C-alpha cells in the first residue's frame, strides 16, 4: 500500500502536459500560459497626471499661496501644445500627458481659480507629486507574464494592455465522470429501499470544472459487466482523464478493476494509506489517466483534491501542481487516533491575530454535509496525537 506522497509521484510520472493552443485572451481565464509575453509599449506611454489639477513647476510655489497664469487645459486623450514656463500652469485632467517644463501636479482641491486665466496654489507642494513617469510600470520589450502562470482576470487585462488579442495556452483537459452502483439513482428520483442519490457525479463534475477541465458526464453504470464495459469504453475515448466513483473495493460486486483491465487499462496501484479513500485505483491506457474512487462522497472529494487536481494542473502546464500545504494554528483542542494519515474537513478563518484553521464537525466518509463549509483539509498523522489550541497543524488549502 503506497503512501499519499508515493501515490502522487506515481500519478504525476504518468501525467503528460497537454498540447499548446492559441485562444483569445477573453476566453483564457484560468488557462495556463504557455509562452512568455512581452510588452510592445512603454506603460504609461508618457509621463501622466494622477490627479485632476494643475501641472506646474514646484520652484514657482516655494512661497504659498502662489498665483500662476493658466496657459491651456489638457484633457485625457489630448496632448499639450505649450511648455510650462516660470509663473505658468496648465489645467490638467487625470491620465493626461504632463506638459514639458512641469514637474508637479497639484490637485484641484488645493487650488483656487482666478478668472479668467489665473490660479492660486494654496498647497502644500512637493516636487513630482501626482505624476507617473513614462515606462514606470513597464518598458517596451520587457517580459511581463512568464509561461506557467494560471491566468487571472487581472492577467487578461494586462495581456490586453500589452497588445495581445490571443495567447498560447495549454489545452483544457477533457474529463469523463462515471458513477457506478445498483444503489445509486439520479437527483430527481426519490431513493427507494437501499438506494442513495448520486451526489458524486455532480460533485466530481464541479471539481473538474473548478480545476480548469471540461467535464463530460457519463451517467450511472449498474453493477453489470456489459453496462460497465460500454460506459468505460465511452469514457476512455476522447478523454484525458476518466474518473469513476464506486465499485473499486474488494466486494463481490466491485467489478470496476476487472472491467478496466479487460479494457486495456494498466493498473499502477489500488490502495493508498489514507483515510478516507484507501481503496483508490489508478491506471492508464496510453496517455489517458484512469481514477477509480471510493463511493463514499468525502472519500471521492478528498482523493480528487489530493491526486486528480494535481494531475489536471500538470496536464495544463502548471509547474507546481500541488496540493498546496501550509502550517496554521488550530482553533481548538483536538485529538486523533487512526492507523492511517487522516484528511479532516476544516475551515481557514481570520482574526485580528492572523489566520487559523478550525476542524469542522465530521463523522466520516459519508458525511458530505461536513464539506459544505470546508476550505481546507487538516492533515492528521497516524497514531494517537493531540493538539492544543494555537498549535500549528499541517493544512491543505482547497481552491474554493
Image (tube, grey):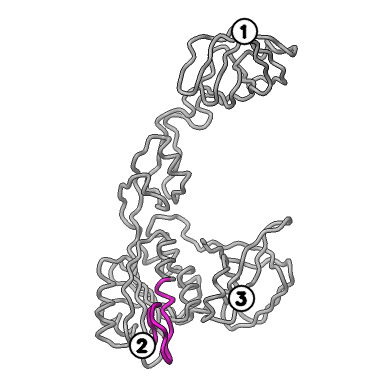
Q: Nearer the viewer, mark 1 or mark 2?
A: 1
Magenta segment, prevailing SS (helix, strand or loop): loop
Give yes or no for residue 273 being in the magenta stretch. Answer: no
Badge 3 is on which residue?
A: 381
Give whichever of discs 3 and 1 has the lower sequence position.
1
Question: In the image, is residue 219 above or below residue 211?
Answer: below
Give yes or no for residue 197 being in the magenta stretch. Answer: yes
Tell me which segment is drawn in magenta: 182-202
Determine the residue positioned at 73% across, 13% down: 65
Q: Name the side, left or right, on which 207 lies relative to 239.
A: right
Q: Secondary structure at mark 3?
A: loop
What is the spatial separation of the Cα atoms under label 3 and label 2, in whole angstroms?
35 Å
Quarter location, residue 247 = bottom left
Badge 2 is on which residue?
A: 182
Give whichever of discs 3 and 2 has the lower sequence position.
2
Q: Nearer the viewer, mark 3 or mark 2?
A: 2
Question: In the image, is residue 154 above or below residue 177?
Answer: above
Badge 1 is on which residue?
A: 69
Amino acid at each position: 500500500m503506497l503512501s499519499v506522497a508515493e501515490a502522487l509521484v506515481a500519478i504525476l510520472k504518468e501525467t503528460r502536459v497537454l498540447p499548446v493552443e492559441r485562444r483569445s485572451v477573453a476566453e483564457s481565464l484560468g488557462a495556463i500560459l504557455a509562452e512568455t509575453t512581452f510588452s510592445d509599449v512603454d506603460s504609461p506611454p508618457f509621463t501622466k497626471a494622477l490627479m485632476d489639477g494643475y501641472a506646474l513647476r514646484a520652484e514657482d510655489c516655494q512661497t504659498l499661496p502662489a498665483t500662476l497664469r493658466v496657459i491651456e487645459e489638457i484633457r485625457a486623450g489630448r496632448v499639450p501644445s505649450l511648455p510650462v514656463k516660470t509663473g505658468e500652469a496648465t489645467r490638467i485632467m487625470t491620465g493626461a500627458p504632463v506638459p514639458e517644463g512641469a514637474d508637479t501636479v497639484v490637485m484641484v482641491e488645493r487650488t483656487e481659480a482666478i478668472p479668467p486665466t489665473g490660479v492660486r496654489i494654496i498647497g502644500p507642494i512637493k516636487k513630482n507629486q501626482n505624476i507617473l513617469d513614462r515606462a514606470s510600470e513597464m518598458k517596451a520589450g520587457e517580459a511581463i507574464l512568464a509561461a506557467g502562470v494560471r491566468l487571472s482576470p487581472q492577467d487578461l487585462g494586462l495581456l490586453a494592455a500589452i497588445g495581445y488579442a490571443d495567447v498560447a495556452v495549454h489545452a483544457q483537459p477533457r474529463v469523463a465522470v462515471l458513477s457506478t452502483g445498483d444503489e445509486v439513482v439520479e437527483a430527481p428520483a426519490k431513493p427507494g429501499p437501499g438506494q442513495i442519490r448520486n451526489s458524486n457525479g455532480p460533485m466530481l463534475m464541479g471539481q473538474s470544472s473548478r480545476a480548469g477541465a471540461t467535464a463530460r458526464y457519463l451517467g450511472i453504470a449498474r453493477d453489470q459487466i456489459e453496462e460497465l464495459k460500454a460506459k468505460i469504453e465511452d469514457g476512455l475515448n476522447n478523454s484525458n482523464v476518466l474518473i469513476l466513483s464506486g465499485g473499486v473495493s474488494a466486494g463481490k460486486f466491485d467489478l470496476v478493476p476487472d472491467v478496466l483491465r479487460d479494457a486495456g487499462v494498466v493498473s499502477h496501484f489500488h490502495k493508498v494509506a489514507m483515510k478516507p479513500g484507501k481503496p483508490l485505483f489508478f491506471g492508464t491506457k496510453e496517455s489517458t489517466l484512469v481514477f477509480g474512487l471510493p463511493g463514499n462522497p468525502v472519500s471521492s472529494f478528498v482523493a480528487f483534491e489530493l491526486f486528480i487536481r494535481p494531475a489536471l494542473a500538470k496536464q495544463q502546464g502548471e509547474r507546481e501542481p500541488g496540493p498546496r500545504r501550509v502550517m496554521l494554528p488550530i482553533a481548538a483542542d483536538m485529538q486523533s487516533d487512526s492507523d492511517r494519515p487522516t484528511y479532516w474537513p476544516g475551515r481557514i478563518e481570520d482574526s485580528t491575530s492572523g489566520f487559523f484553521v478550525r476542524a469542522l464537525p465530521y463523522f466520516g466518509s459519508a458525511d458530505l454535509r461536513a464539506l459544505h463549509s470546508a476550505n481546507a483539509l487538516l492533515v492528521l498523522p497516524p497514531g494517537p496525537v493531540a493538539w492544543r489550541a494555537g498549535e500549528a497543524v499541517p493544512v491543505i488549502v482547497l481552491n474554493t
